Image (cartoon, rainbow, N blue to C red):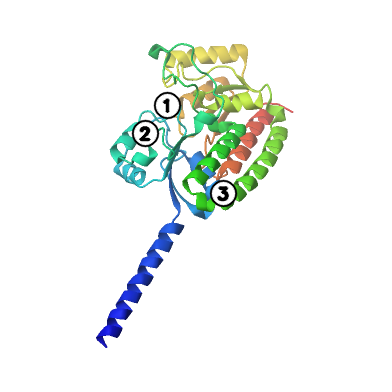
């Protein structure tokens, strides 16, 4: 009887170890996404093969995220960190990386991907001067509002997922092909729907709409911030009122994470429509994923154009 019991214990232990090993082999790749757009893209490409943690949300300023212990813990267990880069997260990401101590996701490793490394950047400064405001040496980091950039990052991210999880290569390739097909078709539709926006004159709060403006051929008349990252004073807002009344504008825009007071005041004193843009996934109820993000942005801008008397 004792030999039979021992045999049962050994068999049960072997089965348990095999089960654990199988579960580990099938465990989802742990991905730490700094911003909602990259969390959404990773889920599109990875499906059930990835477990994505979204470190920030659309209502938060991506420049200024608190390096909370919960973020450190998630960073410590990550297999892949995907962030925008180009110093967008310079105020908080280095603290997380250093404190978490995860060697596999440090910059320069396979486990770290900076999306901005794979796209052509706008507003790259020819000289650095802090007196000019919050200038990013690597150029404007708000790359996600040009869908062609999403396409480029998707290609790089797919390659990285395959490198980290080669057993799932066929699945990653299939999901990437499907996403790129749907995304290319969506870009054709967005180009058509946004064609009337070409030449539309915008007054953004911050430089975070630069890629959107360039993609759609709109015009950035002036920014509400006198310098990037510097809130406008009452005197500067008064100057903007005079300039808008003199030169004209079709819409004042702000992203949902920015302070609404100055744009609202400017709209009130100029009669120019204020358009709140979602900026990223989750910024509005309609922007529930990357496709919804661009659908909603174009719809909001077209509404403002029509309300302003456009055709």
Q: Which marked residue is nearer to the observer: mark 3 or mark 2?
A: 3
Q: Nearer the viewer, residue 23 or 180?
A: 23
Q: Secondary structure at mark 2?
A: helix
Crowding near the residue tagged with mark 1, few <14, some 14–19, many ≥20 C-alpha atoms within 10 Å? many
Circle 2 residue: 93
Q: Secondary structure at mark 3?
A: helix
State the image coordinates of residue 199 (x, y, percent, origin top left): 68, 21
Q: Residue at x 45, y 54 (%)?
A: 28
Residue 56 in which image quadrant: top left
Please indicate, yes or no, whether residue 255 appears anywhere in the rendered image. Answer: no
Q: Residue at x 66, y 44 (%)?
A: 182
Q: Residue furthest bottom?
A: 1
250 to the left or right of 267: right
Q: Residue at x 30, y 40 (%)?
A: 101
User: Mark 1 or 3 closer to N-term?
Assistant: 1
Q: Residue at x 62, y 16 (%)?
A: 248
3 to the left or right of 226: left
Circle 1 residue: 87
Please indicate, yes or no, whether residue 196 appears anywhere in the rendered image. Answer: yes
User: Mark 3 or 2 closer to N-term?
Assistant: 2
Circle 3 residue: 172
Q: Which marked residue is nearer to the observer: mark 1 or mark 3?
A: 3
User: Mark 1 or 2 closer to N-term?
Assistant: 1
Image position of 130 with respect to 175: above or below: above
Q: Nearer the viewer, residue 187 or 213?
A: 187
Q: How many marks?
A: 3
Crowding near the residue tagged with mark 2, few <14, some 14–19, many ≥20 C-alpha atoms within 10 Å? many
Quarter holding the C terminus is: top right
Q: Measure how far apart labels 1 and 3 are at the Cα level.
A: 29 Å
């Amino acid at each position: 009887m004792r030999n039979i019991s021992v045999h049962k214990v050994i068999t049960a232990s072997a089965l348990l170890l095999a089960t654990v090993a199988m579960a580990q082999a099938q465990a989802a790749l742990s991905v730490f996404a700094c911003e909602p757009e990259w969390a959404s893209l990773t889920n599109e490409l990875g499906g059930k093969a990835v477990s994505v943690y979204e470190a920030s949300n659309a209502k938060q300023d991506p420049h200024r995220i608190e390096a909370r212990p919960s973020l450190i813990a998630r960073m410590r267990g990550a297999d892949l960190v995907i962030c925008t880069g180009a110093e967008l997260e310079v105020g908080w990401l280095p603290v997380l990386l250093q404190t978490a101590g995860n060697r596999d996701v440090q910059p320069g490793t396979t486990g770290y991907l900076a999306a901005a490394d794979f796209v052509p950047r706008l507003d790259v400064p020819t000289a650095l001067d802090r007196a000019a405001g919050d200038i990013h040496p690597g150029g404007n980091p708000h790359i996600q509002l040009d869908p062609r950039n999403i396409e480029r990052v998707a290609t790089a991210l797919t390659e990285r997922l395959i490198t980290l999880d080669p057993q799932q290569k066929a699945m990653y390739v299939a999901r990437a092909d499907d996403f790129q097909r749907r995304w290319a078709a969506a870009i054709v539709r967005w180009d058509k729907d946004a064609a009337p926006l070409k030449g539309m004159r915008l007054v953004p709060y911050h430089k975070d709409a630069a890629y959107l403006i360039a993609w759609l051929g709109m015009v950035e008349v002036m920014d509400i911030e006198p310098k990037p990252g510097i809130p406008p004073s009452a005197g500067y807002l008064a100057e903007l009122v005079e300039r808008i009344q003199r030169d004209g504008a079709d819409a004042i825009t702000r992203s949902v994470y920015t302070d609404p007071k100055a744009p609202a005041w400017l709209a009130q004193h100029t009669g120019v429509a204020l358009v709140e843009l979602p900026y990223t996934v989750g910024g509005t109820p309609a922007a529930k994923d990357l496709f919804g993000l661009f659908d909603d942005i174009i719809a909001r801008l077209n509404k403002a154009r029509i309300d302003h008397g456009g055709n």
